[in-house]
Amino acid sequence: MDKTKMQQYTDAFEARKTGGMSEPLWVRRLREEAMAAFVEKGFPSTRDEAWRHTDLTAVREGAFIFEHKPVSLPQGRIEDLKKEYGGNLVVFVNGRYVEEVSSLPGNIGVTGLPKALESMPELESHCGTHADLKQNAFVALNTAFLGEGVLIKIPEGQVLEVPLRLMFIADPAIDGAIFQPRVLVLAGKRSAGTIVEHYSSAGSKSYFTNVVSEIILEEGASFRHYKIQDESKKAFHMASTWVVQEKGSRFSSWALSTGSRLMRNDCYVGLTKEETSCALNGLYLGDGEQHLDQHTFIDHRKPAGKSRQFFKGLMAGKSRGVFGGKVLVRQGAVQTDATQVNKNLLLSDEARVDTQPQLEIDTDDVKCSHGAAVGPLQEDAVFYLRSRGIGERDAGRILARGFVQEVIDAAEQDFFKRELEERVSQKLEAQFCQS
């Protein structure tokens, strides 16, 4: 990485370090370690195998602004959010947690990350421990500027009855702002809950979101994680979600990606103990010149683990989709049951998808499979609908809608299915299958 481009990050780091911000010694050491890792590696290039289909030149060459004034949401906007999504609402504006306008459930803990890091020394064993800052430049960068974000703590045996929505609203006053929130979730033994990470834009400026989420599930915990990314098409969106599962825990996730100019969504799940299970589902809808990259890594470490992956992509215009999914079954992880499926539909001659599912199995007595497909709309299906009096545009939209329905059904909870169906319908109507 060019030294002059790196300078903006090192200068911002030094300014933050000398800004008089109070923090525990372990946090300072963690941030310094992360910054050193970022300076050493810089952003990856297409020469790196995991990034060979995603060109980060626009990020690498970008000039970003780390210090920016907080923006207050109009009261009417806050009331609209509460009306639309209910009482369990955690609001972020430009990456910063806004406690005074958030509505929090009573049976779990939601604490601003700076306060949590200062008052809870036990977080040293979790924050920055699971997300690999030495191998992931964006995790390193986020950790170097650790501070903004929240800790969500579900106590042992507690059930979060109503999903908790984390609403990230980007409304920068200037072009080039960078936001780096951190989400840390600790789900206690036999607890259960659902969170929704929702990233959206309120303005028209360009900006860079770089978010890291660490989710730790203790024994017997059950947790659902939903994500909606519909940021501005001028935005860069880099996200890293790291999940650690203890014995008998269950994790499921669902990611909808429709926004941003360039997105990379990484999800790592470590099944660290016996009889754990996870299910990762996702849908990415691209058009124009969008680049949407979804990567997963499921690490089966112990026996009797179960994982399911199901992702679909629907790409139009000159957009490009990338799916990279890896399942690792380590030695001794017998009776592992893992499947991975990725299907992609191209709605234009210039759209493209690169897909690379991978299985690495180092033990016997397992059941694993993977599959991938990329192709255009089937001509005979379009012809059939047109022969029934349906126009070409409507025929394409109907077939595209049918293509995504299977993955929408995997969302499990009705409230999220309704949101998905509404957003997908809007996207198809506005930007796909146009005459």
Image: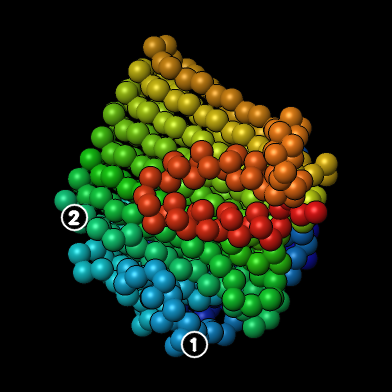
Q: Position of residue 418 (x, y in %)?
A: 45, 56
Type of amino acid at the residue the image marks with label 1: Pro
Q: Nearer the viewer, mark 2 or mark 1?
A: 1
Residue 195 in view: yes
Q: Is residue 94 left or right of residue 175?
A: left
Colour basis: rainbow
The single residue placed furthest to the top in the displayed view is 364
SS class, disc 2: loop
At x 48% / y 26%, what residue is drawn?
A: 339
Q: Which is more toward the observer, 57 or 350? A: 350
At x 67% / y 34%, what residue is drawn?
A: 355
Residue 86, quarter of the rendered image? bottom left
Q: To which residue does mark 2 refer? A: 158
Q: Which is more toward the observer, 235 or 68? A: 235
Q: Which is more toward the observer, 173 or 197? A: 197
Q: Is residue 252 above or below residue 341?
A: below
Q: To which residue does mark 1 refer? A: 74
At x 75% / y 48%, what residue is drawn?
A: 391
Residue 292 in view: no
Type of amino acid at the residue the image marks with label 2: Gln
Image quarter hosting the N terminus: bottom right
Report the Cα–Cα distance between label 2 and label 1: 34 Å
Q: Earlier in the sequence, mark 2 or mark 1?
A: 1
